[in-house]
């Protein structure tokens, strides 16, 4: 039996982020990928041109269809778009006693489009953060969650502390948007750890957050410890960025299958 992972997220038509990035990541790391799609984006490497939220009944039906038949090793949550969708996903996961939930609190695409309505941040905090084994905000998302600018290591630590107090098991505040090293702050409720890596000089970072969070979920599905899952995810995202490529005319994707194609 392969370990199994479920992504609950939006579809990215150009394949670098969202559901598509998550399933590629699961597959590259040896996990059988499944999906519950929350919204469809018309998107390319230059931007998002349209978004359709799916109705909550079909979102809940996808979650129920999977959990009533299949044992799910870990869940990655990405784009949720609205308060109603957040409530539906939270109720669905609770009713199936879902475990190993990795919450990437996706808010704005790299090209600047809202993937979460600004009024839905409160619902994300009250309904989903308490269900998460780990939450992985970038600097902007951390700032929206805690209400102050997060732009240096001290503020990343303070933000991690506050998000942990909202009920998350672990918090990883990603430093992909810092100047200098690509260093993420990990907080387990007691101590801070730093995942440090040199910054790769590239503009092709479409889907980095999606890929990193689904790589953490893949590790949990494979019964790795959370710490080990986070460390392997950091290696995976670094290598995927290193092999990122020039697709389209804008911000290209990372290469999820860099290792497979090499061999
Ligand atoms: N240029 C880069 N070089 C190396 N690592 C990066 C780079 N950009 C992002 N990362 C890493 O990729 C992961 C995703 O972070 P980030 O890009 O901040 O997420 P998001 O896509 O949510 O904005 C983090 O581990 C971050 O440190
Ligand atoms: C459907 C969808 N979900 C998430 C993202 C965020 O992408 P990134 O990981 O680059 O911040 C995206 N662009 N599209």
Image: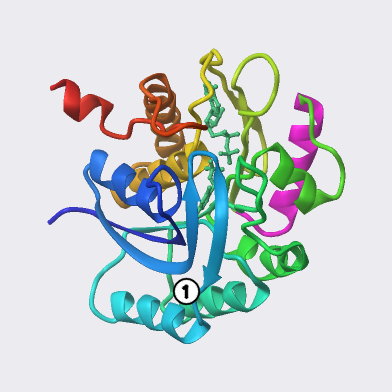
Asked whether residue 30 appears in the rendered view, the answer is yes
The quadrant of the image that shows the C terminus is: top left
Q: Is residue 254 above or below residue 70?
A: above
Q: Residue at x 34, y 30 (%)?
A: 255
Image coordinates for residue 37, horizontal then vertical, percent: 42, 67
Q: Is residue 196 left or right of residue 192?
A: left
Identify the colour scheme used.
rainbow
- In the image, 230 versus 59, the foreground residue is 59
Tell me where residue 47 sits by quadrant: top right
Asked whether residue 160 appears in the rendered view, the answer is no
Q: Residue at x 86, y 50 (%)?
A: 147
Q: Is residue 163 magenta?
A: yes
Q: Is residue 65 left or right of residue 127?
A: left
- In the image, 73 versus 14, the foreground residue is 14
Q: Which residue is mark 1?
A: 93
Q: Is residue 40 above or below residue 251?
A: below
Identify the magenta region.
Answer: 153-168
């Amino acid at each position: 039996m392969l370990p199994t992972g479920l992504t609950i997220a939006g579809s990215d038509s150009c394949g670098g982020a969202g559901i598509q990035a998550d399933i590629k990541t699961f597959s590259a790391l040896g996990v059988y990928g499944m999906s519950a799609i929350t919204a469809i984006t018309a998107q390319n490497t230059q931007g998002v041109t349209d978004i359709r939220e799916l109705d909550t009944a079909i979102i809940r039906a996808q979650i129920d269809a999977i959990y009533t038949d299949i044992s799910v090793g870990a869940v990655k949550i990405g784009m949720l778009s609205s308060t109603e969708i957040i409530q539906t996903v939270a109720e669905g996961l609770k009713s199936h006693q879902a475990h190993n939930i990795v919450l990437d609190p996706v808010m704005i695409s790299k090209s600047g489009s809202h993937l979460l309505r600004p009024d839905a941040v409160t619902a994300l905090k009250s309904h989903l953060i308490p269900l998460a084994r780990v939450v992985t905000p970038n600097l902007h998302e951390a700032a929206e969650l805690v209400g102050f600018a997060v732009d240096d290591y001290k503020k990343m630590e303070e933000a991690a502390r506050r998000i942990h107090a909202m009920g998350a098991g672990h918090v990883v505040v990603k430093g992909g948007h810092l100047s200098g090293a690509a260093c993420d702050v990990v907080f387990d409720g007691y101590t801070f750890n730093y995942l440090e890596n040199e910054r790769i000089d590239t503009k092709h970072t479409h889907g980095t957050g999606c890929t990193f969070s689904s790589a953490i979920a893949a590790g949990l599905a494979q019964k790795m410890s959370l710490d080990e899952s986070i460390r392997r995810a950091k290696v995976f995202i670094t290598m995927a960025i290193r092999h990122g490529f020039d697709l389209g005319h804008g911000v290209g994707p990372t290469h999820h299958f860099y290792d497979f194609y090499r061999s």
